[in-house]
Amino acid sequence: MFEGDEIVLGPLPKGIVRAGEGQHRRVWNVLGHTYWAKAISESSFAFETLDPPGTGVPPHVHPTQDEHIHVLGGVFTLYLDGEWEKAGPGDTVLMPRGLPHAYYNRGESDARALFWVSPTGNLAHLFDQLHDLQDPDEVVRQSALHDVEFLPPGSVPGA
């Protein structure tokens, strides 16, 4: 898929990543979501998402990364450490490392957001592995190999 264009983490490069484009030509399709890499460095990883209605990422934990979501459009239903909340355009969601969280687009229109994690860790490499993968069990397996731990199905009411 991205052969010959391995992600090598280094200092944050300068420049502009244009709308609809991804750094390192990275645009991932992950279980119905589209992710565009906006910045990939050793210190942080930012990506824009397009999340159609009915999509979401089940409860999981990043044990070594802080994660943020800045909602650009639509509404996300979020699970944050035992609580269900909603975030809409202009809201920023803060998820410190180790915090169980999930997000879903339960609305009737697309949702868009800018996500970023710090430090980058293995997340960009994980997205390379998940691109166009259709088997949810393999998504969970690959995620565990890249420092993202999904909670067991049924462990979060309403997920």
Image (cartoon, helix red, strand yellow):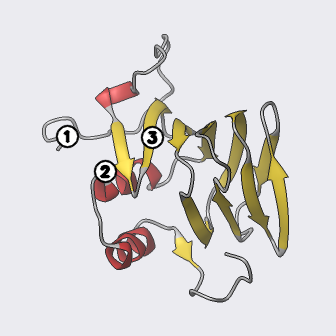
What's the residue at 62%, 46% (across, down)?
118
Is 159 placed above or below 30 here? below
Q: Which mark is residue 128?
A: 2
Mark 3, residue position: 35
Horizontally, is 143 left or right of 89 in the view? left
Relative image position of residue 133 (x, y in whole percent):
28, 61
Q: Earlier in the sequence, mark 1 or mark 3?
A: 1
* Foreground disc of the pair 1, 3: 3
Q: CA distance from mark 1 to mark 3?
A: 15 Å
* Mark 1 Cα-neighbour bin, 10 Å: few <14, some 14–19, many ≥20: few
Horizontally, is 16 left or right of 85 in the view? left
What's the residue at 67%, 88% (across, down)?
155
Q: Are marks 2 and 1 in contact (CB under 8 Å)?
A: yes
Compare residues 158 and 16 and report the one nearer the observer. Answer: 158
Residue farthest to the front, as pictured: 108
Q: CA distance from mark 3 to mark 2?
A: 11 Å
Query: What amino acid is found at the position of numbered circle 3 in the picture?
Result: Tyr
Relative image position of residue 134 (x, y in whole percent):
29, 65
Mark 1, residue position: 2
* Foreground disc of the pair 3, 2: 3
* Mark 2 Cα-neighbour bin, 10 Å: few <14, some 14–19, many ≥20: some
Q: Quadrant of the N terminus?
A: top left
Element assignment for label 3: strand
